[in-house]
Image (cartoon, rainbow, N blue to C red):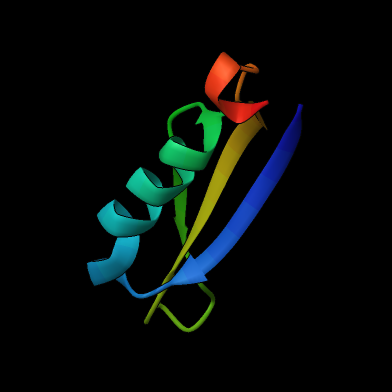
């Protein structure tokens, strides 16, 4: 298990969350504003997707 941090515009939060969920097994994103207040920091707890016959 590992943690992913992404700094992005608020408008990109949903797209990034969906993309990471498609690639990894993720928990819900924790969101915090950046120091300048113009963007958001996202923290995801993630793990690799389980192996499937298609991925081998």
Relative to 12, say whether 36 is above or below: below
Furthest residue toward left: 11
Camera-nearest residue between 23 and 52: 52
Camera-nearest residue between 40 and 24: 24
Screen quadrant of the C terminus:
top right
| Residue 18 x/y as whole percent | 34, 45
Q: Residue at x 39, y 56 (%)?
A: 16
User: In the rendered view, does 54 fall on the left or right side of 2?
Assistant: left
Camera-nearest residue between 14 and 25: 25
Furthest residue toward right: 1
| Residue 54 x/y as whole percent | 53, 24
Q: Which residue is drawn at 48% across and 84% down?
A: 36
| Residue 24 x/y as whole percent | 56, 34
The quarter holding residue 12 reads bottom left
| Residue 26 x/y as whole percent | 52, 30
Relative to 19, say whether 1 is above or below: above
Q: Which residue is drawn at 76% across and 26% down?
A: 1
Camera-nearest residue between 2 and 21: 21
User: In the rendered view, does 4 fall on the left or right side of 28?
Assistant: right
Q: Would residue 29 be visible to someone looking at this image?
A: no
Q: Would residue 16 be visible to someone looking at this image?
A: yes
Total residue callouts? 0
The quarter holding residue 10 reads bottom left
Relative to 12, say whether 56 is above or below: above
Q: Which residue is drawn at 63% across and 32% down?
A: 46
């Amino acid at each position: 298990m590992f943690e992913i941090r992404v700094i992005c515009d608020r408008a990109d939060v949903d797209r990034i969350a969906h993309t990471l969920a498609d690639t990894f097994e993720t928990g819900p994103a924790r969101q915090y504003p950046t120091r300048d207040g113009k963007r958001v920091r996202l923290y995801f707890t993630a793990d690799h997707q389980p192996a499937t016959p298609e991925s081998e």
